Each structure stands twice: as C-alpha cells, then as structure tokens.
Image: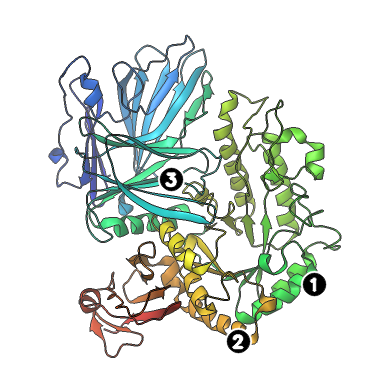
Amino acid sequence: MPIHTSPTSWVIETKNTGYAIGLNEAGLLTHRYWRARLPFAADYPAPVNPIERSSFDMPQHYTPEEYPGYSALRYFDPALKITFADGTRDLVLHYVDFSTSASPYPELALHLKDEAYPLSVTLHYRVHEEYDLIARWVTLENLGNEPILIERAFSAKWTLPHGDDYFFSHMFGRHNNEYNMKREVLTPGLKTIESRRLTTSHHHTPWFAIDRNATEDSGEVWFGTFAWSGNWKITAEVTEFASTRISVGLNDWDFAWKLNPAETFVTPESISGYVKDGFGAASRLMHDYVRNILLPHKNQLHKVLYNSWEATLFDVDEISQSKLAEVAAGMGIELFVMDDGWFHNRNLDNAGLGDWFPDKTKFPNGLGGLIKNVNALGMDFGLWVEPEMVNPDSDLYRAHPDWVIHFPSRARTEARRQLILNLGRTDVQEYIISVLTTILSENNIQFIKWDMNRNVSEPGWSDAPGDARELWVRYVQGLYHVWGTLRERFPNVIWQSCSGGGGRADFGILHFADQIWISDNTEATARLSIQEGFSQFLPANTMEAWVTDWGRNVVPLEFRFHVSMCGSLGVGGNLNEWDQADRELAAHCIRLYKEIRPIIQFGDQYRLISPQKSMFSAVQYVSKDQSEAVLFVFRVYLSDPTNLPMIHLRGLNPTALYEVDGYSGPRSGASWMEAGLRVELKNLQSKILKIKQVE
C-alpha cells in the first residue's frame, strides 16, 4: 500500500510523487514534503520546529500546519473556522490517532479533536497512485449536546516547498468567453478566485497550477481542482516567511452550517498532484483520471450528435424535427437532440419551465412519433431540459410559488424571465425526479442535455432545516441526489451538463454527466481559445463541440468542422439552409471524425502552439500505444508575408518510424519531435494530418 505510517509520521506515495506529514515537537500536525517520490520512507524530511521570533511572530504563525484552524496567534488564512454554542470562536485541534483502508483506493484518515469542545475533525487522503493524484476532504462531527456553527470548512490546505518565487495560473472569463488562462507572479498576501453564483460559474474555474518557470513540456507544476458544482473558493497565500499555501474548498462567503449533536458534515474533494514535466503532463494526468475514474460511461465513444436549436428555436413539432432528422442521418449523424420548445406552453422563453410534459399542440400524440422516426433513421434520440428553473407563467409556479429561492420580503428577480427552484428542498427534488422519470420511462431517450440559464439572486430560504445560509451547499447536494437517482434508474442514458455554456464544468458533476457543454459561443475562431483552456483539466471526450452557422460568411465550413472535431463532435447549424455541397463536406468530415475519434477521445493531448498566444495554433492527440496520432493545425489571421513556425510533434516513440499525411517517407519519432515539420496555411485555413507508426 502506498501509505507508510508510524505513530507520528505519515508518507503518501503515488507512482512518481511523495507527500509527507508529521507531528512536530509541539504536537502540531505539520506538512513535511510534496515533490518527487524518494527511495525510502526515511528519506522524507522531519517536521519543522520553529522558534519564537517575537511576540508578533510566534511559532504557530510560520509552522506549515496541515489543516490549521482559526485560533490563538495564527494570523494566516485558516482552513477551518467554528463558533461553539457558548460563543467561543477559537479552535484548538489536537491529534488523536489515524486509520488506513485499502478499498477501493488506499486511504489515510488523521483524526483530530478540539482540546475542550466536542468537535471531531478527520482529514481524509485518498491515493490515486497511477495518476499521481491525491484527493483530500474533511469530516466534521459534533460529539456534544449543543449545536456548533461551521463558518468555514475548506477541504484542504496544500503547502508548497519553501519559497516565494512561484507563478499562479488560473482561468477566468464570462458567458461566451470562458477559460482564459492567466499566469501571474504570486506576491505576498492572498490571491483569491471563487464563485458566489450557486454554480461553478463562467467567470472563474475551480482549477489552479503553481509553477517555478515551467513550460508546457518541462518544469515543476503543482496543480489541482475542486470537485464541486456550487460556490467554491481557492486562495493562494504567500506569507512574510516565504511560505506558500493553497487553500481549496467551499466558499465561506455568506456560508454557515448548523452542525447539530451527533451530526456530521463532509466537505467535497480537493484533488491535486505534482509533475516535473510541465503543464501538459499535469493535464494528461487529470484527463486520464476523469476518463478512467470519474465518468459514468468510462470507455464509451461519444456519438456524433445534431442539435436542432439553431434551426427551429422554439418552433418545434414532429414534422419539422423529422425533416431535420432525415438530413442529419444522411450526413452520418448518430444522435438527434431536440432542444427547447417541446414542452407545455413553451413558445418563447417566458413560459412553460417547470411543466415537463409534451405540448399537446405541437405533439398531440406525445414524443413517441418523432422518436420512432429518428430511430428508424438509425439514430438515437436526445432531449433538452432545464429542470432547476421555473417560469412564473407555468402551472408549477402557480401551484408552488414557495418552491423558488427567494426572500419573502423582496421582489423575486427574474433573469431570462425565470426563477430558480430550491433544490435544497426534498419536495422539489422528488418532483423533478418524478417528472423526468415519467419522460424517460415512456420514451426511448438515450441522451439528456441538462441546462441552467441563470445565476442566483435573493438567496433566501425561510423554512430552512438549519441556518438559511446552508442553501449554498444543500442546493448542490440536492442536485446530486436528483442526478444520482436518475442515473441509477436509467443507467444507459448519457447526460450532458450545461449552464448557459461552461457555467457548470467541474469534477463534481462528472460523477453523473459524461459531457459538458463548454460555451454558448460556437464561433470557431473563438472556440480555439476556449477549448484550449478547458483542456487544462478536462479531456476531449467530455467537451461537446458543435459546428454551427456562427461566422459562416467568413469562416469556411471545413475550418468550423476541424475546430469541433477536437472534442466530442456535434452539429448545430440550420441544416435547412445548408446546400448540397455543405452537406457533402459535412458527411466527409463526419466520416473522418469517426475514423480518428478513438484517438481524440481516449488519447493523450499535446498543446503544441497555443491559440491563446498565437493566431497560428496546433494541437495533437496520440493513442495510448503511440501507434497513431492526429495533428490539427489552424491559422486564423496573420498579415502576409509571414514565416509560419515549425511544429514539433510530441508523444511519439522516439525510435519508431512514423508516416505523416502529405509528407514523403517515414521518419523517426525523434525526428518529427525534434526537427519538426512545417504546415503552410492561408488565413482561415486548417488541416488535419494523420500520423501512423509503420515499424
């Protein structure tokens, strides 16, 4: 087992990394090491034992505690903040003992307890040895007879090797412009990224990377994410003593949790790792972890889908959708998805949300006729839903106006003319489970696109079971209960997470969803940047990417297809307006994608030239056995004359011979990687080059 223990020290080892903790002479649980794996457990450094520098800088302040609470003379950012029933806001944790387990993954649990109050704190460590990842979370248990108020409960505080020369990478954006990479120097103090929106958010992404002059292919990188689909917070702190720490967990803004006697509170997982080989290596570890550990349908190729939204908007019926399905099937589409507009009284976005049964005017005989037509064409059928929302103009809202998130004394702010149902409520959860169970039981539906098109306002809950500020957590727990229940009942259905695009893209939702709709922006040149940012922590098979009509007068259809083929390919354009040449090109691209999609969806991704830094970009996918690869190259706009850069392939076997489409004669993998190749393109041109090992 990759966990070495003694009465006062613990070492966690993955395939290539070591992580060490120990009790110092003061009895404080202290971080010791997080870097490359060492040969022997005894090689890891001992816990530090700082001395008092002055009354302003006591030893606790610069001891790298593994999970410090707010107490005494600690002035750095704490991992845990508690108020006890008598008003005491001070936490003094003492180590008690530890335990280990081996199934299904090795785990270490370190048990702590407050010295005077009945609060137990357990630090959990799960080892994903092959992926060089450690998952951490915390369990709080009230052992007493009075409630305890939790005001902050981070899942982990990650301590880096001593120093103040780190760079902090994170992603920011907005709706239609997600996943912009930012790499900046960490300076003394706190750097915070977060979501306060009830969802993961378009605006910041729960991912971080810390490096010391690393590149895509080399250098030390410490990286991680938070497996949660609601409010989150990541803080990077550099203290005055050059201690650098990353705290990851639930956002404590407007948060409180009333922990009643005999109850426990369990935080979500913080998942992190370390590599010596740059940002690309970190990404590939996370990609493998997601594909092999998280996803419900782990090794299932994702089908090429068509979504009818841009063609018909809300004007859907059996005839119009069946005609689109015929065109889609002729191009080689495998999955037909009907979007918004199919349910009761849904003609615009101002009515119908909440009433999840087919509109009798549009579908007088239900969805069965359309689904039969789609299946007869050799395609699966999928459906769009937005169950977390309700329009005030709906039967559901008229029956249950109290079901929405609101303050009774305030007006209910609408966004996109809709309100948010409170999924923290069990009656709301059971309603959503019931109506979707009916739809899925009565119809042959193989795919669900689950959308959420607004963020929270007036976050009130007048009859909450505990503190009203528990809403932020109880809502997401309710969402997971709904998704989990439906997944158990309909295990073969593929679910896609969408929140106006990339507003809910995280490791938490991927326990239930196989795909993520990463942006409502489907303009191909913009998508290059969005897709690259997404790839920092999520793999190509989770990335639904449509070919649409955005930019059709400027950007060639082939370019648009090539961009979308970098993920899980979909088509969303208005096929009624595509001429025969467009449809034939689409059929050609879809045939090519089906040929190469195992490499794209399950292979290793290499970001060769970044579209966030250059108008000429390249990305490569390599099969796990290194026998095949695919290179995508894009040129958006560069003034001529220009000298396009050499492209250096990655991930090939250096001593094997490979052929590359369009290049005469085989060359060694080392030659393709070191000497490189040149791809000549004009503005708004792209190429896909297949690479195959020949000996």
Q: Where residue 658 sits in the image (x, y, percent)?
A: 28, 82
The answer to whether any part of residue 228 appears in the image is yes
In this rendered view, identify the residue nearer to me: 640 or 155: 640
* Neighbourhood count class around disc 2 (C-alpha, 10 Å): few under 14, some 14–19, many 20 upward: few
Q: Which residue is mark 1?
A: 319
Q: Residue 99 falls in which quadrant of the image?
A: top left
What type is the residue that disc 2 sits on?
Ala
Q: Quadrant of the C terminus?
A: bottom left
Q: Which residue is mark 2?
A: 581
Q: Secondary structure at mark 3?
A: loop
Which residue occupies the extreme bottom position in the image?
664
What type is the residue that disc 1 sits on?
Ile
Q: CA distance from mark 2 to mark 1?
A: 25 Å
Q: Residue at x 47, y 24 (%)?
A: 151
Q: Which residue is mark 3?
A: 206
Q: Where residue 209 sits in the image (x, y, percent)?
A: 32, 48
